[in-house]
Amino acid sequence: MQETLGKAQEGASNVVRAGELLEEIAEGIATISDRNIQVASAAEEQSLVAEEIHRNVDDINSLVIQVSAGAEQTAVTSRELARLAEQQQGLVGRFKVS
């Protein structure tokens, strides 16, 4: 009888310990779940930032193309003005001031 009582108490202790271990496991799972949520949130935020950077790079690229076209047009206009200045200089040179 005494042996049975001892085994019952040992079994009860094992059940309590198993319950404690299950509680620790549940807490660990909850912690992992929280961290997974944080990682997913951070990944989503990084994705949004990457998309914004991509849009900004596209905008910069468009502006560079516009500036390049403007610079080319300025160069063409400058050459034309230089040609006209030379032409005008030639015309003015024909006149003599007495």
Image: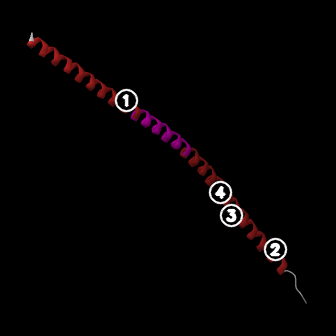
Q: In the rendered image of this protein, does residue 41 appear above or below residue 75? A: above
Residue wearing tag 3: 75
Which x, y percent locates residue 42?
46, 39
Instruction: Name the mark on residue 30.
Output: 1
User: Would you call the spot at circle 4 few (<14 residues within 10 Å), some (14-19), or many (20 or more)?
Assistant: few
Check if mark 2's residue and mark 3's residue have beta carbons within 8 Å. no
First in sequence, mark 4 or 2: give its number: 4
| Spatial CA span between label 1 and label 2 | 86 Å
| Nearest the eye: 26 or 8 | 8
Tag 1: residue type? Ala
Q: Secondary structure at mark 3?
A: helix
Which x, y percent locates residue 59?
61, 48
Instruction: Name the mark on residue 85.
Output: none
Quadrant of the frame with the N terminus: top left
First in sequence, mark 4 or 3: give its number: 4
Q: Identify the image quadrant of residue 90.
A: bottom right
Specify whether residue 86 is painted magenta.
no
Q: Nearer the viewer, mark 4 or mark 2?
A: 4
Tag 3: residue type? Ala
First in sequence, mark 3 or 1: give its number: 1
Tag 4: residue type? Val
Residue wearing tag 2: 88
Q: Identify the image quadrant of residue 12.
A: top left
Which x, y percent locates residue 63?
63, 52
User: Would you call the spot at circle 2 few (<14 residues within 10 Å), some (14-19), or many (20 or more)?
Assistant: few
Residue at 76 percent of width and 68 percent of height: 81
Q: Nearer the viewer, mark 1 or mark 2?
A: 1
| Nearest the eye: 30 or 72 | 30
Residue wearing tag 4: 67
Tag 2: residue type? Gln
